[in-house]
Structures are given as structure tokens and as C-alpha cells.
Image (cartoon, helix red, strand yellow):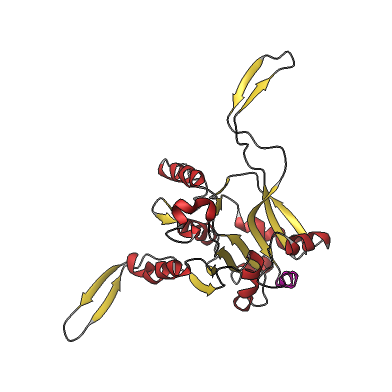
Amino acid sequence: MDKSVNKLTGKMKVVILAGGFGTRISEESKYGPKPMVEIGGKPILWHIMKIYSSYGFNDFIISLGYKGHKIKEYFEMYGLNSADVTYQFGDKREKTFHKVRTEPWNVTLVETGENTMTGGRIKRVSEYIGRSPFLLTYGDGVADINISELVKFHFSHGKLATVTVTQPEGRFGAIEISERNEVLGFKEKPKGDGAWINSGFFVMQPEALKYIEGDETVLEREPLEGLAADGQMMAFKHDGFWHPMDSLKDKNELEALWSTGRALWKTW
């Protein structure tokens, strides 16, 4: 990455959408927001932040909605739970932290309303974004995307937005058959039908926020469609690992990958 881009990356903020209800994983989200569902004993939100942090992006803006207090409570206790601590009781009550093991994160938690749509949540945190380019993602998906290469690509084309796209695996295994109908082999969950989908890792210029009207705006509709129609969006192709957490099945699959040392999103 050239020096001009390097200077910008240190100032770029990461916006994480973490306010949805998570209805498709209600078995877990009834106790808290979906980004707080744990993989390997840590919220998936933590995993996402670790991905960005491994590339030097440590300034986070997290939009809160459904059970947002759970996320506030987590970060309120994060330093305490990551350090040794001495409590002095009696007349002079003091609390001293030792060996603090937290990451160098700056975390801004913003109340954006329970029923606000994805675009509206971004609009509501705009005052914390400022006038600089920013990264954006959802609070429920992990990948081994090279964030530095994504940012470099964004600044190379001069458009207002970059969306990372991927080809998800198919739902079922496939059988490879010859022209003579001989079974040549089996493929476990090959890539889908060749279509590229939005994997949820964006880079945007602040001017892209003009495409968002208000709380009722869904990011994936008018804003992204408008940017595309105006020729202001480019796609960064990601051929590696990507996995959403839309359902309990997804959660269990991610848990299995983590527990067996196959968590490809673990870039730190």
C-alpha cells in the first residue's frame, strides 16, 4: 500500500451494524443482540473487530438497537475481564489494574433505535464518522478478507463505494459425472451457481451517505442500487473463506471450525 493510502488507513473508522433483531437465530438472540452470540467463548462481534484490528484498524463505531445495553455492558467490563486487578477495601477504596491485555481499540457505541433500518443506522452514526472515508460491515459475518488490499483497491478506482463480493458454497454436495455418465468423484459443497453476492465488507467515501434518506432506508436497496446506477460502486472479489451467522446451524458450524483449529477468519 502506498504512503498516501497508508496515512488514511490509520484514521479510517470501522462502522459495524449491530442493531438488528436476529430473528433467524432467535434461539440465541432472545438473550441478546445477534452480534453477541458467542463463538469460542467470544461474541462474533469481537471476532469481527479482531479481523480489522489485525490490519491496523482500531477505531470502531458500533450502531446499537435491539438489546443494545448488552453490548454496552460487555465493553464496560471488557477491560476488567482482560486484566489482573487489586481491590483495596476499608476507608481508602481503590481499584488497580495490572497486566491489562486489551487491544488498542477506540469503541464508540451509538444508540440508533430498535426499528431503524440498516441505512438509517449508518445515517445516525454519521456525526461520528466525520468527513473521512470509512469501512463498514455487518455484525454477523466473518471472513479471511485482506482488509489492506480491500482499502488499497478502493482508493485505486476513485468511486464512492466498494463492496466485497464472494461466491458462497452450495447447499449440497455434488457428483462429478463424465459424458458417458460415469461417476468420476464427489465434491463437498462446491461453489454455487457462479453468482457473486454481497459479503458485507465495504469501504465508502463520506459522500455515499447522501444516498441514505433516513431511518426507513434499507442500505441494500436505494443506497446501494443508487450508487450502482450512478456508476459509483466497484466490487472487490474475495475467493477465500466467508461465513455468515444467519441461523443456529451457521453458529454451530462456526463453533466447530473454531474448536478444531480451522477458523480461517482468525487473521490475528
Q: Residue furthest bottom?
A: 91
Residue plotted at (53% across, 74% down): 111
Q: Is residue 208 magenta?
A: yes
Q: Is residue 43 left or right of residue 4?
A: left
Q: Is residue 225 left or right of residue 41?
A: right
**Residue 7 visible, this orientation:** no
**Residue 195 visible, this orientation:** yes
Residue plotted at (47% across, 57% down): 29
Magenta region's main secondary structure? helix
Judge by depth and name the residue closer to the eye, 96 or 139. 139
Residue plotted at (64% across, 18% down): 184
> How many numbered tags mark residues here?
0
Judge by depth and name the residue closer to the eye, 77 or 172. 172
Q: Quadrant of residue 180?
A: top right
Q: Which residues are magenta?
A: 206-213
- Residue 255, compared with residue 56, is above or below; it is above
Residue plotted at (51% across, 72% down): 109
Residue 8 rendering spot, x and y as whole percentages: 64, 70
Residue 151 rendering spot, x and y as whole percentages: 66, 60
For the N terminus, the image quarter is bottom right
Q: Is residue 136 left or right of residue 25?
A: right
Residue 187 rendering spot, x and y as whole percentages: 60, 27
Residue 185 rendering spot, x and y as whole percentages: 61, 20
